[in-house]
Image (tube, grey):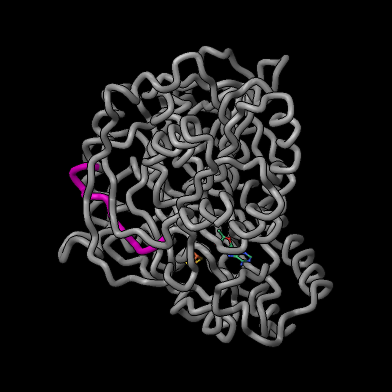
Amino acid sequence: MSKQEELYKKYIRPSLVQARDRKNPITYEEFHISAEDKLLGVNKTYFIYTFGCQGNVADSEIFEGILNAASFTLSNDPSLADIIILNTCAIRESAEDRVWGELGRLKKYKLSNPNLLLVLAGCMSQEEATITKVLKTYPHVDIILGTHNINKILDYIKNAYFNKERVVEVFSSSNSVISSLPKTRPSSFKAYINIMYGCDEFCTYCIVPYTRGKERSLLKESILEEINALIKQGCLEIVLLGQNVNAYGKDCYSNYSFGNLLEDIALTNIPRIRFTTSHPHDLDLLTIQIMSKYPNIMPHFHLPVQSGSSNILLKMNRHYTKEDYISKVKLLKQYIPTISITTDIIVGFSYETESDFEDTLSLVKEVEFEGAYTFMYSKREGTPAARFDNQVDASVSKERLLRLNELTNELTLKANKKYDGKIVEVLVEGKASKGNNILYGYSKNYKLVNFEGDESLIGKLVNVKINKIRTWFLLGELSNG
Ligand code: 5AD
Ligand code: SF4
């Protein structure tokens, strides 16, 4: 057997079919780092490219946390780094194309620094097709790991360094929840907190239930412990993360749900709580009631609708109709009159007719979303929808996307106008651009606000009087009121 064949045998590759598996019971583990590993990265640097959603941003914070705990230093220049990690996204083909482009560009660093370790991580690693393509055409990738084993990054680095072998280890599924993972957060005042991993919804277009595995909630004690520690360090805003936060607790509690968790977190008195993402089917009355009861739960709800046609929603396996969605929105507006609602919409899903699309336009008009992320459907190999006939022509999808965007932009601008002349509370996140003193931050309703002020305000809650309205942001001036 050739050396290459021997290596191939050692590789642990993913299977999207096995990734459907939801049978194994959930286990809980603690992360530990050995005394020896704590010195692994002395005099070595790393750089991370993060693609995709907040889930990936949170995973990159864990990569950073583990590498920092092992004495590696974060570099701000990939051309000088000893390790480069690409934390990838597989949600749409365009997201994958960006990663392939970056991988190609990184080849030159490998030529100038043969000791560079190139690591492919994240959702794309969970796909068989990615592994096959990398093994065939990207020999400069040294380590491939998936979303279920980021805790093992130091083992893989040691293996690649000491055995000078390519490491491929991607588990198809995971039933474990690992706590005490070190995290390095870029901000002291705003933190992302995973409350659950995975997704069991299996929307027919979506690759996430395969790349991120079965729904697994973190135990409430460990979430609250993390939040209390952040509060002690001066954190002002937390964003709870999960693919479907409304399913929180279903896997581990019989009588404790997302609404209960929100209430316990609100009672810690952290000034601002946000969460993403929600599923209309699992959003319950308790969550809405708790939101209306506690002013530190921000009045913004991101509630992806995906389509306004009940026929298409059925084909998408979303478990609600257009009317169900509208009644949840009515409840939200009734209980929390100041709420702003944003959404995700896919156009051109298989079988979508002009009349289905018009149902989407009519739902958007009725709900008056304050913001919408809109996408053209992208076929994902391994998902049920990849086998649907009646794929919509790209030119038709493009035209629908333009029409939809025109409407959603109009509604965003209209919604923004209601803040004109109002004083809004902003958590200042940073400078809008170098060279001037324009700061930016988000209002309670998750509106991006720009205003003039001193850098010393970064990380503080301030009041801003809004005096100019744009579609993508609001402009204002500091106010004492
Ligand atoms: N094609 C286009 N958009 C998709 N999304 C998820 N899967 C696909 C796909 N295959 C969108 C959904 C989801 C958001 C994160 O990405 O709108 O809410
Ligand atoms: Fe994908 Fe649907 Fe799960 Fe969201 S709820 S991650 S769209 S399968």
- Picture coordinates of residue 59, whole percent (x, y): 45, 42
Tell which of 27 and 220 is nearer to you.
Answer: 27
- Which residue is painted at 58% across and 21% down in the image? 75
Residue 354 lies in quadrant: bottom right
- Which residue is painted at 44% across and 15% down in the image? 42
Residue 218 counted in the magenta span: yes
- Picture coordinates of residue 108, whole percent (x, y): 76, 32
- Picture coordinates of residue 67, whole percent (x, y): 43, 28
Tell which of 63 and 169 is nearer to you.
Answer: 169
Q: Is residue 71 above or below residue 417?
A: above
Residue 23 counted in the magenta span: no
- Picture coordinates of residue 38, whole percent (x, y): 34, 22
Residue 339 shown left or right of residue 249 in the figure = right
- Which residue is painted at 22% across and 50% down in the image? 28
Tell which of 278 and 122 is nearer to you.
Answer: 122
Q: Is residue 86 above or below residue 288?
A: above
Residue 39 shown left or right of residue 467 in the figure = left
Residue 468 shown left or right of residue 8 in the figure = right
Can residue 481 be seen here? The reply is yes
> What is the magenta range?
213-222
Question: In the rendered image, which quarter contains the N terminus?
Answer: bottom right
Can residue 289 be seen here? The reply is no
